[in-house]
Image (cartoon, rainbow, N blue to C red):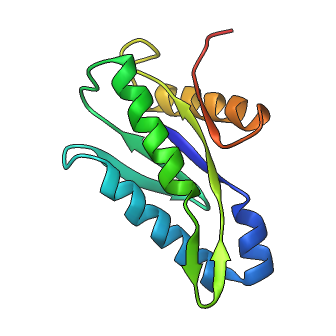
Amino acid sequence: MFIDLDEFKEINDQRGHNIGDEVLKCITDRLLGLVRSTDLVARLGGDEFTIIMNQVSSDADLEIIVQKILSAVQSPIQLDGFTASVSASIGVVTCPGDGFNADELLNKSDRAMYVAKAKGKNQWQRYQSS
């Protein structure tokens, strides 16, 4: 999964980098709380994250996981008398269906994320070949 936080830039620009950093830490904790010990959560930079999950058993399970992530990210964050609200646009790929190597999977999940963002944000999109 490639995750980009919607509306994060505005928080960072209007409230400063210290508040932005606290939002990122909170989102990181929420993401880590949703995955298994065998999964990987990584911040790629800025407000972008990736999650690598092994052995998701079905499309239905994948949808449940992604919906939990969207809900967790969207939950308001209380910081020093300020409530921060962000959402997430998520691009999803599967291996081996969408590719085998990390660069290809990251590129395709990034492209799927931009489709989710273009469709109105706060949603997810599976990679679809052109």
Q: Residue at x 39, y 37 (%)?
A: 65
- In percent of width and height, residue 54 lies at 26, 31
Q: Is residue 95 left or right of residue 17?
A: left
Say above or below: 53 vs 41: above
- In percent of width and height, residue 76 lies at 58, 67
Q: Residue at x 41, y 60 (%)?
A: 30
Farthest residue toward the top? 130
- In percent of width and height, residue 119 lies at 76, 31
Q: How many numbered circles are shown?
A: 0
Residue 28, by quadrant, is bottom left
- In percent of width and height, residue 16 lies at 71, 83
Residue 52, by quadrant, is top left
Nearer to us in this view, 73 or 55: 73
Q: Residue at x 48, y 54 (%)?
A: 72
Say above or below: 116 vs 68: above
Q: Residue at x 77, y 37 (%)?
A: 120
Nearer to us in this view, 55 or 44: 55
Q: Quadrant of the C terminus?
A: top right
Say above or below: 115 vs 81: above
Farthest residue toward the bottom? 80
